[in-house]
Image: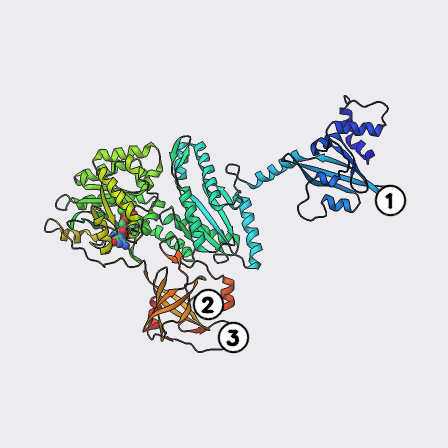
Amino acid sequence: MFAKGRALFGQAVSAAAKVDVPSGMGDAAALVRAYESLGLGSFWKTDSEGCLTYLSSAASAALGVSEGLAGRRLLDLFLRPEGESERTLPFVMARKGRFERVTVRSERAGEVRWWSVSGEPRQVGGEFVGFLGHCVDITTERLSAEENSHQALHDPLTGLLNRRHMSQLLDKTLTAFAPQQRSCATMLIDLDRFKQVNDTMGHAAGDALLQQVADRMVRVVGDKERVSRLGGDEFQIILPDQDDRGVLGDIATSLISSISQPYSIDGNRCIIGASVGVAISPYDGDGKDELLRNADLALYAAKGSGRGRFRFFCPDLLKAAEDRRLLEEDLHDALEKGELEVHYQPVVRATSNIVTGVEALVRWNHPEHGMISPARFIPIAEESKLIKVIGEWVLRQACADAAHWPGNLRVAVNVSAVQFADEGFPAIVASALASTQIDPDRLELEITEGVFLQEGCTTDARFNALKGLGVRLALDDFGTGYSSLSYLKTAPFDKIKIDQSFVRGATGADSRNRAIIAAIVALAEALGMDTTAEGIESFDQFELMKQLKVTLVQGYIYSQPIPNDEFVANLAGGQWEIEPVGPAHQRHERQAMYRRVGVVHDNHYYPVVLRNLSASGALIEGLTDVPVGTTFVLDLGDGQLTVATVRRSRKSQQGLEFETMLVSDGNGGMCARVRVSPYQLVAAGVPQNMRGDGPHLIGQADGKMSLPAFGMATDWKARSEAA
Ligand code: C2E
Ligand code: CA
Ligand code: CA
């Protein structure tokens, strides 16, 4: 062994000319000394019991046995290996054969070092008498190799997994989970308004912001190795064995609210937001690519429904993406073809029922699809930049209509953040005022917090330019987004509009919204601003708003948005006093619908129509002869099976109570917390689509073929076709 060593280390020895070699020492011994003292490696020797009889001084010091070797076993110098393998030191030494470069670790004073150990058995007269060996401290190489592999797998800026590594991880997880029928959720997260921060505060600030975002995400998820930065301001998380949409919704909400807290960067404050799309394997796709595409569609939908939201994938999104593309095409010529109209919804003084103004709301009368909600096409317009043309047209139309109204009724116009950010916007407003000659004080521009978060001095300059024209400014949709009251102190608002979702949440017995609204009203009053409560439908909401001293009310309790002629007709007497009309109570978040679903009872699957749905129950239609107390499984589609008990049954309608509550789908709708996986659905014979006219048998035929327990309503066919 030493002969080999000589050739290998010849270079080192010649470089070691200065090394003191005691005279009278044999060549081999001198070489060993030279080698040791250069720190290139250490030699060791054990007896047949594995106890050390020799160890180079360099290794003795590093391994803490300088005091003496008496009774010390080689194995005891190193940490016990993790796991069982043929490459561990105890294993190879027990075999009493030759071994090479076995990696071991030592620990001394809290410092871990890595060693590569080789050894050769010594024999005397055919009998094993111990090992003669060599060891090298490889800590430095080891750490730099780890560093390199960390760099190859991680994003250098945030230390999170990089895109490539995340992609492999997801792929590996899904492949391993599929045979075990385990689930795995993935979330795509996109920061809202990150680009503005980057543009206005600089690249370095953008980097610092991304690092803080990464830290916050890791804190929510609790495991750094599950979070990835895909690039830019896009992130991905994987959550193995998680298919509970209640839990996933909570995680997504925590991510959004954590990311949306203000950041301090070099003493500057900034706020961004986040949108989250969620897809869960195997329900929403079993391969990596399909799952990712679907998470991406969900993310896109989350952004489209107002940002700062999460959204679960559902198959409708695939169709929605296509519909959206087609709508965008049509929207290009909608204005030219005269398909857009402006309707006006009265804003009423709650104490007198007198209309003080209106909000202009754009309407699109599509030749094929009929009326399309602005909630649907405005986001498309915003994305395709069509919003500038459409927004300008609405503004000019609203001013032109207002010029013909009697008195000083105000007209409020919604301004999208994209329009507001445009440098030419104040000039457009000035031109609309000039050409219609309306008093600037009659024009109110409704803007959302979104514009604010665009950062920097341009926002202030824009506010000043608009205030300089004499128009009024309203903060719209308060209570939906970040709802920071700090904007109110800095920007010259004349009004706060409290969003309908916030009002809705205020009527509950233990709602905090009530106290928040009271605080907003007090603050607005102190700052000389008006308050409008939006979306008031029922008397309980109405009375509450009056009690909380909200000055103005807008909602169906007074009037829906109406065409200009109708509005003008109501103003014939000079002013319009409206008697509020509406239900006493807000209906309990029960969403009316007309959707085909299925019911499973015994061996039968019945198609039915879902008429309404709340978190705790539903109303179905289509079955007859269903006794109260019947328990069956409601199939809401896509594996959403919910155990339900019939609480009311009248002719062909049954009121159901769910065994477990549905959870929010992040989009104002509801979904089942946990889905039944496609594997189980197929195994149970549940149909993959809910077509079919009557009950049919499902499940394994176990000899107990029953007849359908319920009849189908006679007008079923007509109903189901409508659905
Ligand atoms: P918004 O600014 O929050 O407008 C109020 C929305 O609530 C309107 O929906 C209105 O019809 C509806 N609403 C009013 N009272 C009630 C009520 O009592 N109950 C219920 N359930 N809803 C009520 P609409 O007209 O569908 O508009 C939706 C959104 O589209 C608006 O929300 C606004 O953000 C946007 N939008 C509408 N027109 C324009 C426009 O010209 N420009 C821009 N940029 N956005 C617009
Ligand atoms: Ca509005
Ligand atoms: Ca609103």
Mark 1 neighbour density, 10 Å: few (under 14) some (14–19) many (20 or more): few
Which amino acid is tagged 3? Ala
Is residue 336 something one can see in this rendering? no
Q: Nearer the viewer, residue 406 or 644?
A: 644
Q: Secondary structure at mark 1?
A: strand
Answer left or right for 488 relative to 45: left
Which amino acid is tagged 1? Glu
Above or below: residue 134 compared with residue 16 = below
Q: Nearer the viewer, residue 62 or 389?
A: 62
Q: CA distance from mark 3 to mark 2?
A: 16 Å
In which quarter of the view is residue 37 placed? top right
Q: Residue at x 80, y 45 (%)?
A: 96
Q: Disc 1 or 3, which lies upstream in sequence? A: 1
Name the residue carrying label 2. Answer: 687
Image x and y of residue 598, in percent:
41, 67
Ligand 1 within 8 A of label 2's CB? no
Q: Nearer the viewer, mark 2 or mark 1?
A: 1
Name the residue carrying label 1. Answer: 127
Answer left or right for 393 relative to 15: left
Q: Residue furthest left?
A: 573
Q: Disc 3 or 2, which lies upstream in sequence? A: 2
Above or below: residue 66 compared with residue 447 = above
Q: CA distance from mark 2 to mark 1?
A: 75 Å
Is residue 299 something one can see in this rendering? yes
- Display coloring: rainbow
Mark 3 neighbour density, 10 Å: few (under 14) some (14–19) many (20 or more): few
Q: Secondary structure at mark 2?
A: loop
Q: Nearer the viewer, residue 371 or 490?
A: 490
Name the residue carrying label 3. Answer: 701
Image x and y of residue 276, in percent:
43, 48
Q: Residue furthest top?
A: 18
